[in-house]
Image (cartoon, rainbow, N blue to C red):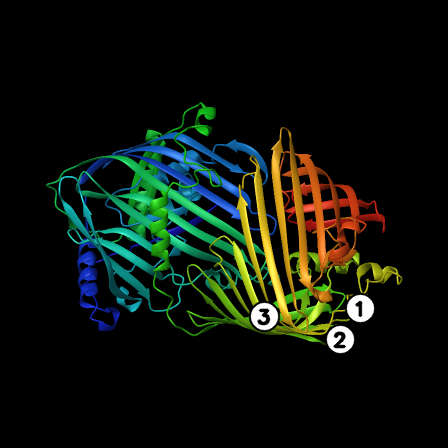
């Protein structure tokens, strides 16, 4: 697994540019000039240091029922670095796991080779942030002696303090802070705000905090000027990626590097952290968090040694020679070696033979999802959150993306529906448009939106004429139901035509999706079944889709508010999630509804159990398209969509499976009823029992269910995001 984010500082001797438009005030010009002058030299006064490094990585996946933890790693090292000598690295704790596959913890792969990434030369100008696995540059003798490390691959940021950076950035001074030490010494820190001139993923937006005495950058809080976009930033390598998976993006909430002052003189790295979310299309979100902390420093240095001029960058030939010499030392001295830009770090890693002690070491940081879920203190996190909210906004800029073709879905209303989506990025606003055409009757499906997003809120205004599912959480217009309709001849969704405008408010994609608000004005009309085409119908003309609901004609003004919460993410421990939705409308029909769902999973010895309870009640005159519908894998397995419906409902499901999350055998039962709220207590309930197989902690699920109450029958379901 490799995801390396490189924060580069390519620094050479040059005076600041005379571009006055780059500086919004004279103090900003002074700070940049002083910091740049300092960075033109190197500090070799640190002779040696010892430190303890702790790191943790977490990668998850967001889903409707609950978030899941896909990968986690925790690492603890003791590093003893000495200039012009071999660095000693003791592994004092290490473990990794893929909880969605196996609860087993094991030592990280190639721990010996990767450990060298965490030792650093204090004189260096380059830090690596991320999940690092560079076996190709460490142990392969051919690559090690010939590969040009001056051309390393990665996401190379334009450093704001690099010579000529005025062409890429504008600068302004911000807040100031005074640090008072117990001996009475004070240090004044000044904020330099960094504003990118254009929307480029290689430019940064954020703040540098600069020590006024030494002009060293002691804190950096930044994020790319825009999200990383695979299609836009990689080029033509995505031709084989299906359209429904695009766009593939990585949204960064923040990247931060924080330094601490040790021995009253030396600024040493203390905290490196990243928070980001990778997305694919509209259906996949993968949060990624990274934290690395250095503490317990013991620094030895020569306080009389002056800063020296920075040597020029090595040529490719010089770099190759250095790497060849380093590799020769590996062979002769039985050490490891890491080279970058003509400078090599020889190191020796000590890994204890007691694997169990490493896996359970108390020095390891807490895993993501644990009770004490952070290497960063609560106060620091609050301060970081406030600072993220103050980061400079993206610049205004016109950037049009080519239309994204290949949008396709299938249902009994449209048959095959084909479409395209386009985006116009204005920097602080984003325009988007989607157009589809139904093959069955040529009916168009159109939507245009305007999006505004900041560090806490995502606001979108849209106008549309579209086919709408009565239950958005069932994802009836998604790829899963489309495949079921086409291949199995079974469309579990119910639909109506909506024409109108809406305002949606939710957290940005980089934050947990704890709430969603939608306000709409909409004309609602019925949508007729237009086709029976499917693979089963091709061989059996009597295999027909069921009719769609007859929606009530209505002109509605309404709102929907949803709140969500979750506790626990590791399948080795108990987890629960809940959501509450309140909605209502006025116009042709006046009504209000409220519903809630509670989900719990827990290990039961060698087994795992899950329970899900849901219910809803309404008031007023509810139109048919605002009923609750039971049937299908999301609500009532064993039954087709709309097996029962009404303005009130209740349902429950219980599951029991083996504990191994990679592949489970599951026994389950569903029960529920829907109908008029005044008669729900006497309504005959539906019930189904069955067995299934689950993969990757319920991300993929296949069930065989017997409906034991009328209408009885057997049914096979293939779906995603199951309880177990």
Circle 1 packing at 10 Å, graded few (<14), some (14-19), many (20+), is some
Q: Nearer the viewer, residue 134 or 195?
A: 195
Please give the residue where the numbered disc 3 appears in the rendered image: 520
Q: Position of residue 648 (x, y in %)?
A: 71, 56
Q: Quadrant of the C terminus?
A: top right
Residue under the image location 31 percent in, 39 percent down: 294
Cα separation, mark 3 vs mark 2, equals: 27 Å
Residue under the image location 45 percent in, 23 percent down: 354
Q: Nearer the viewer, mark 3 or mark 2?
A: 3
Q: Position of residue 346 (x, y in %)?
A: 31, 36
Q: Position of residue 652 (x, y in %)?
A: 70, 45
Q: Which comes sooner in the sequence, label 3 or label 1? A: 3
Q: Are marks 3 and 1 in contact (CB under 8 Å)?
A: no
Tag 1, which secondary structure? loop
Please, which residue is most extreme toward the left here?
304
Q: Which comes sooner in the sequence, label 3 or label 2? A: 2
The answer to whether residue 398 shows anywhere in this view is yes
Please give the residue where the numbered disc 2 appears in the rendered image: 441
Residue 37, compared with residue 303, is above or below; it is below
Tag 2, which secondary structure? loop
The answer to whether residue 641 shows anywhere in this view is no
Q: Nearer the viewer, residue 520 or 300?
A: 520
Please give the residue where the numbered disc 1 appears in the rendered image: 531
In which image quadrant can residue 280 be found? bottom right
Q: How many marks?
A: 3
Q: Position of residue 377 (x, y in %)?
A: 35, 42
Q: Are marks 1 and 2 in contact (CB under 8 Å)?
A: no
Left-right relation of 12 to 524: left
Cα separation, mark 1 vs mark 2, equals: 9 Å
Residue under the image location 40 percent in, 73 percent down: 397
Cα separation, mark 3 vs mark 1, equals: 30 Å
Circle 2 packing at 10 Å, graded few (<14), some (14-19), many (20+), is few
């Amino acid at each position: 697994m490799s995801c390396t984010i490189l924060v580069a500082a390519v620094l050479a001797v040059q005076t600041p540019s005379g571009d006055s438009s780059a500086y919004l005030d004279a103090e900003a010009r002074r700070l940049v000039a002083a910091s740049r002058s300092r960075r033109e030299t190197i500090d070799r006064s640190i002779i040696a240091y010892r430190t303890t490094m702790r790191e943790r990585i977490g990668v998850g996946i967001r889903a409707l029922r609950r978030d899941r933890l896909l990968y986690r790693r925790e690492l603890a090292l003791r590093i003893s670095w000495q200039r012009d000598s071999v660095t000693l690295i003791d592994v004092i704790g290490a473990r990794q796991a893929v909880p969605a596959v196996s609860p087993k913890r094991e030592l990280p792969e190639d721990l010996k080779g990767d450990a060298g990434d965490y030792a650093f030369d204090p004189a260096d100008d380059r830090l690596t942030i991320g999940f690092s696995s560079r076996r190709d540059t460490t142990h392969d003798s051919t690559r090690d002696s010939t590969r040009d490390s001056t051309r390393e691959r990665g996401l190379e940021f334009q450093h704001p303090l690099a010579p000529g950076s005025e062409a890429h950035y504008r600068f302004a001074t911000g807040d100031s802070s005074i640090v008072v030490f117990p001996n009475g010494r004070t240090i004044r820190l000044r904020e330099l705000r960094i504003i990118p001139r254009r929307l480029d993923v290689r430019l940064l937006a954020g703040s540098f905090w600069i020590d006024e005495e030494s002009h060293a950058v002691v804190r950096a809080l930044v994020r790319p000027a825009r999200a990383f976009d695979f299609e836009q930033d990689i080029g033509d390598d995505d031709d084989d990626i299906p359209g429904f998976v695009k766009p593939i993006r990585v949204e960064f909430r923040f990247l931060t590097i924080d330094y601490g002052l040790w021995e009253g003189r030396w600024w040493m790295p203390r905290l490196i952290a990243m928070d980001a979310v990778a997305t694919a299309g509209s259906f996949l979100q993968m949060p990624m968090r990274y934290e690395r902390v250095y503490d317990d420093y013991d620094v030895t240095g020569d306080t009389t040694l002056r800063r020296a001029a920075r040597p020029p960058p090595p040529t490719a030939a010089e770099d190759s020679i250095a790497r060849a010499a380093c590799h020769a030392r590996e062979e002769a001295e039985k050490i490891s070696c890491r080279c970058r830009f003509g400078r090599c770090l020889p190191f020796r890693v000590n890994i204890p033979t007691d694997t169990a002690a490493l896996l359970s070491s108390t020095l390891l940081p807490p895993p993501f999802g644990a009770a004490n879920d952070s290497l960063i203190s609560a106060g620091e996190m609050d301060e970081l959150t406030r600072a993220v909210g103050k980061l400079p906004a993206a610049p205004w800029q016109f950037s049009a993306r080519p239309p994204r073709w290949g949008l396709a879905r299938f249902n009994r209303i449209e048959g095959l529906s084909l479409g395209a989506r386009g985006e116009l990025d204005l920097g602080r606003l984003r325009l988007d448009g989607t157009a589809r055409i139904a093959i069955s009757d040529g009916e168009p499906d159109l939507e245009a939106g305007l999006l505004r997003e900041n560090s806490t809120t995502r606001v979108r205004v849209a106008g549309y004429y579209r086919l709408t599912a009565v239950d958005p959480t069932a994802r009836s217009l998604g790829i899963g139901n489309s495949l079921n309709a086409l291949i199995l001849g079974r469309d579990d969704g119910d639909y109506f035509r909506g024409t109108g405008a809406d305002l949606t408010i939710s957290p940005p994609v980089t934050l947990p999706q704890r709430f969603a608000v939608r306000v709409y004005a909409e004309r609602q009309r019925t949508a007729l079944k237009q086709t029976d085409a499917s693979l089963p119908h091709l061989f059996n003309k009597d295999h027909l889709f069921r009719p769609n609901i007859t929606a009530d004609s209505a002109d509605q003004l309404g709102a929907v508010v949803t709140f969500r919460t979750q506790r626990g993410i590791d399948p080795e421990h108990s987890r629960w999630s809940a959501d509450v939705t309140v909605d209502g409308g006025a116009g042709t029909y006046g009504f209000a509804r409220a519903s809630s769902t509670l989900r719990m999973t827990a290990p039961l010895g060698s087994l795992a159990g899950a329970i899900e309870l849901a219910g809803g009640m309404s008031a007023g005159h509810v139109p048919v398209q605002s009923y609750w519908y039971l049937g299908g894998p999301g609500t009532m397995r064993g039954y087709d969509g709309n097996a029962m419906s009404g303005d009130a409902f209740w349902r429950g499901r219980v599951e029991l499976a083996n504990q191994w999350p990679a592949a489970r055998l599951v026994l389950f039962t569903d029960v529920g009823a829907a109908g008029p709220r005044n008669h729900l207590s006497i309504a005959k309930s539906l019930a189904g029992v069955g067995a299934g197989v689950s993969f990757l902690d319920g991300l993929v699920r296949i069930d065989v269910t017997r409906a034991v109450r009328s209408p009885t029958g057997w049914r096979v379901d293939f779906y995603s995001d199951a309880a177990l």
